[in-house]
């Protein structure tokens, strides 16, 4: 069994509503001896006896080659799936003990998703896209628009409130997606290859934004195949063949090795189950 516990905590004000963090706060995410097996013609064990904790205010990156278990980890942490064995606790709740409806409510309240493909509703303007999660939280129209406008201003898009995704650059779309992920003030930001669809310069700007969010006290779990992106985190969890191969404290990393892309062949074409392209079926926001 591989065990990892992040004990660092941070948190104050926010560019995106970071939460205060008591010294002895329980983990935002706690996986204990988790195994996930997919049944079919042949059973596939995607994760095997994995234990991992994310403390409030922590910033963790996950790396590993295709098929290493990264996508399965995201599905479990994001309450999109349940483990075959072991326990996944999200903000203190055992996700396997929840009904599907309660799990969806916990997911909407606790997790903010940032996908490689943005997943914005094409017919909605930016402020409506950001406000969308608040519709399902029962927030009234005026309050959700005010909250969405404030978040867009915080990510540098205060002058793009009324623009549709087709009128925005890739970097601007990802900023809208990040603002949307923050709308419900989640306990956890879950980012799947957030720089995968933008150029290098824009990717650096996106990572600067994640750094600001972390400094504001937000808890972040980021999956990437790029070493230079992973090194923005406090630690890197390396997955291979469904187990944690090692955990690296980024502060201990050799700066001369930064240009060497660990897991260079590490292109995982599958994101979490929720990471497919969005279809535009929303009503008035």
Image (cartoon, helix red, strand yellow):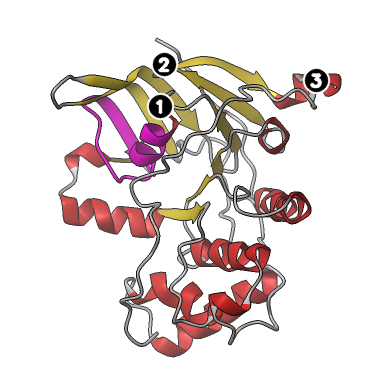
Secondary structure, mark 1, is loop
Which quarter of the figure has residue 98?
Answer: top left
Name above or below for residue 8 compared with residue 45. below
| Labelled pair 2, 1 in contact (Cβ < 8 Å) | yes
How far across and down, in percent of the image, does residue 126 sit? Answer: 55, 78
Residue 271 magenta: no
Residue occupied by mark 3: 257
Residue 128 image position (x, y, % from top left): 47, 81
Distance from disc 3 to disc 1, alpha carbons, whole Å, reads 25 Å
Residue 272, image x, y percentages: 38, 44
Q: Magenta residues?
A: 71-91
Q: Nearer the viewer, residue 260 or 88?
A: 260
Q: Quadrant of residue 34?
A: top left
* Residue located at (69% from left, 30% from top): 227
Mark 2 or mark 1, which has the lower sequence index? 1
Distance of label 2 from label 3 (alpha carbons): 24 Å
Left or right: residue 220 versus residue 169 is left
Toward which corner of the image does residue 139 lie, by quadrant? bottom left
Residue wearing tag 2: 241
Q: Which element carries disc 3, helix, strand or loop?
A: helix
Pointers 2 and 3 in contact (C-beta within 8 Å): no
Q: Say if 216 sits above or below 31 in the image.
A: below
Q: Secondary structure at mark 2?
A: loop
Q: Residue at x 54, y 64 (%)?
A: 177
Residue located beneath label 1 in the image: 69
């Amino acid at each position: 069994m591989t065990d990892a516990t992040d004990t660092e905590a941070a948190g104050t004000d926010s560019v995106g509503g970071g939460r205060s963090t008591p010294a002895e706060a329980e983990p935002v995410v706690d996986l204990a001896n988790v195994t996930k097996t997919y049944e079919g013609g042949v059973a596939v064990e995607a994760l095997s006896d994995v234990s991992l904790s994310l403390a409030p205010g922590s910033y963790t990156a996950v790396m590993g080659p295709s098929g290493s278990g990264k996508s399965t980890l995201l599905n479990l942490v994001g309450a999109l799936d349940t483990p075959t064995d072991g326990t996944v606790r999200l903000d203190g709740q055992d996700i396997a003990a929840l009904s599907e409806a309660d799990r969806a409510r916990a997911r909407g309240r606790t997790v903010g998703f940032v996908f490689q493909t943005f997943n914005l509703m094409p017919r909605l303007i930016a402020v409506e896209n950001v406000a969308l999660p608040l519709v399902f939280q029962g927030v009234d129209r005026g309050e959700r628009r005010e909250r969405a406008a404030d978040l867009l201003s915080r990510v540098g898009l205060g002058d793009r409130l009324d623009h549709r995704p087709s009128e925005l650059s890739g970097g601007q779309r990802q900023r809208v997606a990040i603002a949307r992920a923050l709308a419900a003030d989640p306990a956890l930001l879950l980012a799947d290859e957030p720089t995968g669809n933008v150029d290098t310069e824009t990717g650096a700007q996106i990572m600067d934004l994640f750094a600001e969010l972390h400094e504001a006290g937000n808890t972040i779990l980021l999956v990437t195949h790029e070493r230079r992106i992973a090194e923005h985190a406090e630690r890197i969890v390396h997955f291979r063949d469904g187990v944690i191969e090692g955990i690296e404290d980024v502060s201990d990393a050799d700066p001369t090795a930064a240009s060497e892309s660990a897991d260079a062949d590490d292109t995982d074409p599958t994101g979490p189950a929720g990471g497919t392209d969005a279809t535009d079926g929303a009503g008035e926001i």
